[in-house]
Image: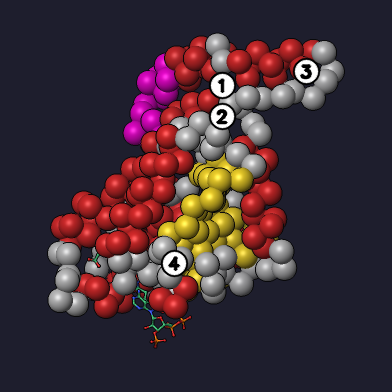
Amino acid sequence: MSSVLLEVKDGVGSVVLNRPDKLNAFNREMCLRLQKSLDECAGDSSVRCVYITGNGKAFSAGQDLAEVIGPDMPGFNKILSEHYNPIITRIRKMEKPVVAAVNGVAAGAGANIALCCDVVVAAESASFIQAFSKIGLIPDSSGTFFLPRLVGWQKASALMMLGDKIRASEAERIGMIYKVLPDENFSASAFSIAQFLAQMPTRGLAFTKQALDLSMSNSLEAQLSVENDLQQLAAKTYDSNEGIRAFVEKRKPVFKGS
Ligand code: T3D
């Protein structure tokens, strides 16, 4: 069985982290496979939303620590520059929404890969740990970028230094994730969010994502200019035309993702 499974269904590229006996901990092979799956989703116009989840009881325990001290240790530079950073970049540059469905524990890089996604939902029994401090490492996989922006500097700093395991309900309460969903039927409920997004105006969502990313470093003036430029592009899409016409004609819009 492959360490990452990809299936396209209902316009959703469903990416499953699949090393359940290792709590879906990432080794080099799995990171490269995840990158490939993300590339396939990016290049497939029938995929209008990407859905990432884990098989078994964990979302991901982060880096496979056995690999780090094993004979085939890739080296810390490679682990970030060739494994995790390209995954984060692919998710952020993906011109379609990416949903993380956190089905169980998400630790280290596993947590931060989830947190860089556009919509993060978690099962009520799931948990999040910035596990890095416990092994003398710093939070990577974009954790130092996104976590303070999601929950504020103080919460992020404490979570990173103390390495607390926090429950999904607490993650929702502090704004780290979008929503907690019941354990019962979690994957079906989470997947239905991805199916819904896959029917929405894909290009408009991609422009929204681009605008949000640019807002991380822009001044207000620069961001107003970004909104002006991207709104003009959005307004030229088929789906925007369809959405406006459907509203005026009091009918349900049918979006094509173009
Ligand atoms: O070069 C670099 O490394 C830089 C990159 C860093 C990126 C990172 O992600 S660093 C952070 C790495 N992850 C961790 O430090 C998390 C370590 N794991 C845990 O803290 C706990 O296992 C969990 C909180 C995730 C889950 O706890 P629990 O009680 O549900 O399970 P467990 O009993 O601790 O683990 C179950 C098994 O999975 C166990 O193996 P065993 O005893 O059944 O043979 C455990 O050793 C193994 N396991 C869990 N996490 C990892 C792992 N094996 C390898 N790597 C792991 N990350």
Residue under label 4: 1
Tell me the kind of residue under disc 3.
Answer: Phe
Q: Earlier in the sequence, mark 3 or mark 2?
A: 2
Residue extent of the magenta highlight:
212-226
Left or right side of 177 for 137: left
Query: CB of residue at label 4: within 8 Å of ligand 1?
Result: no
Residue under label 1: 258
Location of ligand 1 given as a quarter of the image? bottom left
Query: In front: mark 2 or mark 4?
Result: 4
Q: Where is residue 53 shown, x and y percent of the image? A: 52, 59
Q: Earlier in the sequence, mark 1 or mark 3?
A: 3
Left or right side of 137 for 115: right
Query: In front: mark 4 or mark 3?
Result: 4
Q: CA distance from mark 1 to mark 3?
A: 18 Å
Q: Residue at x 82, y 13 (%)?
A: 249
Vertical position of residue 149 compared to residue 47: above or below: below
Residue under label 3: 247
Q: CA distance from mark 1 to mark 4?
A: 35 Å
Vertical position of residue 11 compared to residue 61: above or below: above
Vertical position of residue 157 compared to residue 146: above or below: below
